[in-house]
Amino acid sequence: HSPDGSYGAPLGNEEIAAMTTVQPVPVSEGQELAFWCWYDIEEGWDYAFVEVSRDGRCYEVVDSFTGRSDQWEYRTYSLDGYAQDSVFIRFRYTTDSRTTGQGFFVDDISPVADFASVSTLDASISDSHYDIADRDQGIYYYRVRGYSQPHGWGDFSVLKKMRVGEADNAPPEPPSISGPGRGKIGRAYDYVFRSSDPEGGSIYYFVDWGDGSDSGWLGPYASGDNITVSHTWAEQGTYHVRAQARDQEGIQSPWGVLQVSMPRARLLLLYEGLVQMLCAALSSWLYPWLGPNM
């Protein structure tokens, strides 16, 4: 979908291919799993799946795909059932021994894990507690797993978020919105949104287009980065585009607002003008015949 390419499963019969996030993804309230996909799959026999798992071992199917999409589709799924936990995200494609299509392709997946670094603090803890000290201000995520002599290492726990710094977490700035203030119905327009988080954390955006539709939560994006989202209005009118930013802890900003006008199409105005001109010409032509009392 993006110009740089997309992720696709290998083609062939009796294939089972999977792509899984390397690191677990922290999930906050209101967050959605979103991606673009295109597929050409033997209907009813071959399938693609999108799945999530807390432990990376047992996966729950979020959705399945078979048949043909004909175009790129944007899919979103609520992750509220996993809020305050962390999940692995997996895309899986399976084929039988007969006909195969062009396969399953996915791109622009959100959310993804955005950690500055990943390291092991200690691999030989024998006590029931462990002290962590002298951390710089910021947000940290920790997970643990156990070890036994007969079985080796077990699975990791879900991530536990810890915040180091001042007790108050300031919300992101209201997003700025730039883009056309006027346009034509049926045409897509790009709008650029930008917000900054006082703590420098990642940001999610929510856009209300004013016509009853919205973008859902998009992200994460780096603090201060511009993001571009396009929209098409179907009816004439004046709309108030509203945007809100949210940080990694779910703290939301005030709304940013931009007024956009979609006036009547020029073709309609031209038609009305021609009718007026025709009526005026007809009136001047009939006047000598009918007189001033027509």
Image (spheres, grey):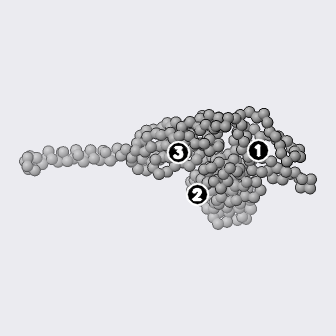
Q: Are marks 2 and 1 in contact (CB under 8 Å)?
A: no
- What's the distance in space between the residues labelled 1 and 3, CA to CA? 32 Å
Residue that carries the numbered disc 3 in the rendered image: 207
Residue beneath the point at 47% across and 43% down: 241
Residue that carries the numbered disc 2 in the rendered image: 69
Mark before the other along the chain sequence, 2 or 1: 2
The image position of residue 255, as x and y in percent, is 51, 41
The secondary structure type at the circle numbered 2 is loop
Amino acid carrying label 3: it is Val
Residue beneath the point at 85% across and 42% down: 122
The image position of residue 1, as x and y in percent, is 60, 47
Among all residues in the image, which is located at the extreme right? 149
Density class for disc 3 (Cα within 10 Å; few <14, some 14-19, many ≥20) is many
Amino acid carrying label 1: it is Tyr
Amino acid carrying label 2: it is Ser
- Asked whether residue 103 is in view, the answer is no
* Mark number displayed over residue 142: 1
The image position of residue 212, as x and y in percent, is 47, 51
- Asked whether residue 264 is in view, the answer is yes
- What's the distance in space between the residues labelled 3 and 2, CA to CA? 26 Å
Depth check, mark 3 against mark 2: the one in front is 3
| Residue 218 lies in quadrant | top right
